[in-house]
Image: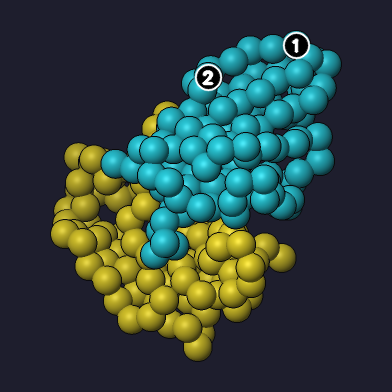
Chain colours: A yellow, B cyan
Amino acid sequence: KNEVEQSPQNLTAQEGEFITINCSYSVGISALHWLQQHPGGGIVSLFMLSSGKKKHGRLIATINIQEKHSSLHITASHPRDSAVYICAVRSSGYGNKLVFGAGTILRVKS
Amino acid sequence: DAGITQSPRHKVTETGTPVTLRCHQTENHRYMYWYRQDPGHGLRLIHYSYGVKDTDKGEVSDGYSVSRSKTEDFLLTLESATSSQTSVYFCAISDPKNEQFFGPGTRLTVL
C-alpha cells in the first residue's frame, strides 16, 4: 500500500463546478504539500500546511491530522485549472524528504 | 520564481553511456533533491543533499550517483545508462521554511 493515496485518479469537470481532490496518508508527517503540474510543464507548489486550512484565490486546502487526510478544493473551476494535482507529505524524520501521491489528472471543460 | 535551473533540458543517449545532469540554484539553500517522474509512479526521490559534500540515498538510488562540491550545484550521474532510466528528472530545493521549489525538468531518453 502506498504511503500517500490520492483520489480520484482522473477527474473531468464542467467549467464553474466545485472540485475536490482527496489525499490520505499513512505515516507521521510534519507537513503536507499540494503541487500543480500543467501538461509538459514544471511543478509548482500551491500549498504547504500542517494544520487547519489555507486559501489562495479559488483554491482551498484543508488538513485533518488526526484522520491523516487532506483535501484540495477548487471553486468556480476554469479550463486553465486543467493540470495534474499532486499531494506530497514531508516525513517527520531527517532530510525534509517528500513522499508523493500518484497525482490526480484534472480536466475542466468549457 | 526560485532561481533553479537544470541542464540539459533534453537528452537522448545510448545504453551504456555515462550521463550527467546538472542542477543549479541561486538561492543558497542547503537542501537539494533529485527526483524522477514516471507514468504510474509519480515522483520518486533518487538522492538528496543536505549540504556541500553531504548526500544521502532516496528510494530509487540504484544506478545513480550524486555530487555536491558547491552549494549551488547538485549533479546527478548515471554511470552506465539503461533504458529503465528513461524518465523526466526534476531537481528541487527546499528553503528554510521547508517549501520546495522545482526545476523545469530534464527529459532523458536512453535508447
- Quarter containing the N terminus of chain A: bottom right
The three-letter amino acid code for the residue at tag 2 is Pro
- Judging depth in this view, the residue of A103 and A89 nearest the camera is A89
Q: Residue B87 or A73: which is nearer the viewer? A: B87
At x 68%, y 37%, the residue is B67
Q: Is residue A67 left or right of residue B26?
A: right
Say if residue B68 shows up in the picture: yes
The residue that disc 1 covers is B14
Name the disc covering residue A67, or none.
Answer: none
- Tell me the quarter of the picture where residue A3 sits: bottom right
Residue A29: quadrant of the picture = bottom right
**Whether marks 2 and 1 lie on the same chain:** yes
The amino acid pointed to by label 1 is Glu
For the residues labelled 2 and 1, the Cα–Cα distance comes to 16 Å
Give the position of the C terminus of chain A as an image quadrant.
top left
Q: Tell me: residue A79, above or below residue B95.
A: above
Q: Earlier in the sequence, mark 2 or mark 1?
A: 2
Can the viewer see residue A6 in this picture? no
Query: x and y percent of residue B105 in the render?
Result: 49, 31
Along the horizontal axis of the image, is B102 left or right of B61? left
Quarter of the image for residue A93 reads bottom right
Q: Residue at x 61, y 26 (%)?
A: B21
| Residue pointed to by mark 2 | B8
Position of residue B6 relative to residue B28, above or below, is above
Which percent across, then down, holds residue A34?
40, 59
Circle 2 or circle 1, nearest the eye: 2
Q: Residues within 10 Å of mark 2 (few under 14, many from 20)?
A: some
SS for tag 2?
loop
The answer to whether residue A59 is above or below residue B106 is below
The residue lying toward the viewer, choosing from B13 and B41, is B13
Identify the secondary structure beneath mark 1.
loop
